[in-house]
Each structure stands twice: as structure tokens, then as C-alpha cells.
Image (tube, helix red, strand yellow):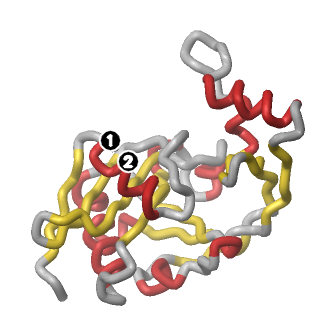
Amino acid sequence: MKKYKIELLSDISEITQFISDWHYSHSVSGVDCRYCFALYDAKELVGAAIYGYPATPNSWKKFGSERSEVIELRRLYLLDEEPRNAESWFVSRTLRWLAKNTGHKIVISYSDPHYGHVGTIYRASNFTFEGMTKPSEVILWDGRTYHRRSMNTKTSEGVLTPNAARLRYALDKGEACFKLMPPKYLYSYNLESRR
């Protein structure tokens, strides 16, 4: 194993470009970031993980009695040239940190088969397979995929964000369209087992 260094970052902006360049979503837009980890090989950024509250409203209710008990692994990416077990090594250490330094009880994560992901890394990291989600509808626009909720995102003043307004305009003009996506794999990890 390489001599990696993991850093807990205070600001998501330190890995925003890395995620935009390499993660299949190409975005951190709409990601609630509570904990942001960077993985370095020497001084080179080779991986990132972002944990935040679950993206799907009320999805936490299946796993906890309070929203604060459940955290979601929202983004994970390591460069392809990193060793095969580097992802599980990285995830394991971030889980250990969460168990020791937060009050969260459960981590959940999704794998999207549309992008060829079935959760191999989660199985290798001792997550529990919880089943499949329902199919979801997304918006396809300008070569990117947006969750349907993106068109309803509002500012603190209660007006649509510029991105939401652009999505609605693109849909109205026929430049964007809705597409039904296949179910995702859902995994959970019990942080209390590591305490």
C-alpha cells in the first residue's frame, strides 16, 4: 500500500474541481457536505469522499429515529491508477473517523448501475446490502443528468436558484427531457459497531 495521507477538509471547495473532473456525476451541486475527506499520495490529490445528510427526503427514517443519526456517503472517487484495495482502505478510515468523532449511527450509500456501479467497494468495506430503490426520474440536459428535485431548488429568499430556472426553461423549450432511471443498490454501515 502506498503511503497515503488522509485529511479532513474544512471546505468542500478544496475538492470541488477534483469531483467535477473525475466523479461520474461531474458535480457537487446540491450535495449537503458535513464531512469532506481528501486522500493524498505525497502532495497529489488522488481521492475524495464527501459525507452529508441523505439526499432523498425522509430516507433516513428507515435507519434512524432522528435525521441526525443517519449520514450518507454522497461522493467517493479515487483515481483509476490507485491500487485495487485503496478505495476500501480509504472508506474504512473515514468510517473509523466518523465513528469516533460524530454522533451518527448509520452511514448509507447508493450504487448506480446506470454507471456500472453495483456496490463492490461497499461489500468490501462491510456495508450491508439493503435492497434496491425505486426507479427515479432525472432530467437530461446539455450532456448532464440532474435529479428531478433540481428544478425546484430555491434560495433562502424563496426564489428559484439560477440553475433551477435554467432547467425549467430548458424543459419548456424542449432542450431538456425527463428520463426514467433504473433502481439503485442501497447499502448501510453501522457506525456503532466501530465504537
Give residue 159's quadrant in the image. Answer: top right
The answer to whether any part of residue 108 appears in the image is yes
Task: Give the answer, above or below, for where 121 lies relative to 68.
Answer: below
Residue at (56, 71) in percent of width and height? 187
Q: Is residue 5 left or right of residue 83?
A: left
Amino acid type at mark 1: Ser
The answer to whether any part of residue 195 appears in the image is no
Instruction: Give the crowd class for mark 1: few <14, some 14-19, many >=20 residues within 10 Å.
Output: few
Which residue in the protein does label 1 denote?
13
Residue at (63, 30) in percent of width and height? 163
Task: Give the answer, above or below, for where 96 lies relative to 52.
Answer: below
Closest to the observer, 40 or 169 = 169
- The N terminus lies in which quarter of the figure? bottom left
Amino acid type at mark 2: Thr
Where residue 170 appears, x then y in whole percent?
Answer: 79, 34
Helix, strand or loop at mark 1: helix
User: Would you say the residues marked 2 and 1 are in contact, meaning their CB atoms lie under 8 Å apart?
Assistant: yes
Q: Is residue 67 left or right of residue 177?
A: left
Which residue in the protein does label 2 denote?
16
Helix, strand or loop at mark 2: helix
Where residue 182 appears, x then y in whole percent?
Answer: 79, 68
Q: How far apart are the two marked residues, 2 and 1, measured between alpha carbons?
A: 5 Å
Where residue 126 appears, x then y in whole percent?
Answer: 43, 82
Give residue 171's quadrant in the image. Answer: top right
Where residue 118 appears, x then y in whole percent?
Answer: 61, 80
- The C terminus lies in which quarter of the figure? bottom left
Residue at (23, 53) in percent of width and height? 101
Residue at (24, 65) in percent of width and height? 39
Task: Give the answer, above or below, for where 121 lies relative to 42.
Answer: below
Closest to the observer, 39 or 44 = 44
Instruction: Give the crowd class for mark 2: few <14, some 14-19, many >=20 residues within 10 Å.
Output: some
Total labels: the figure holds: 2
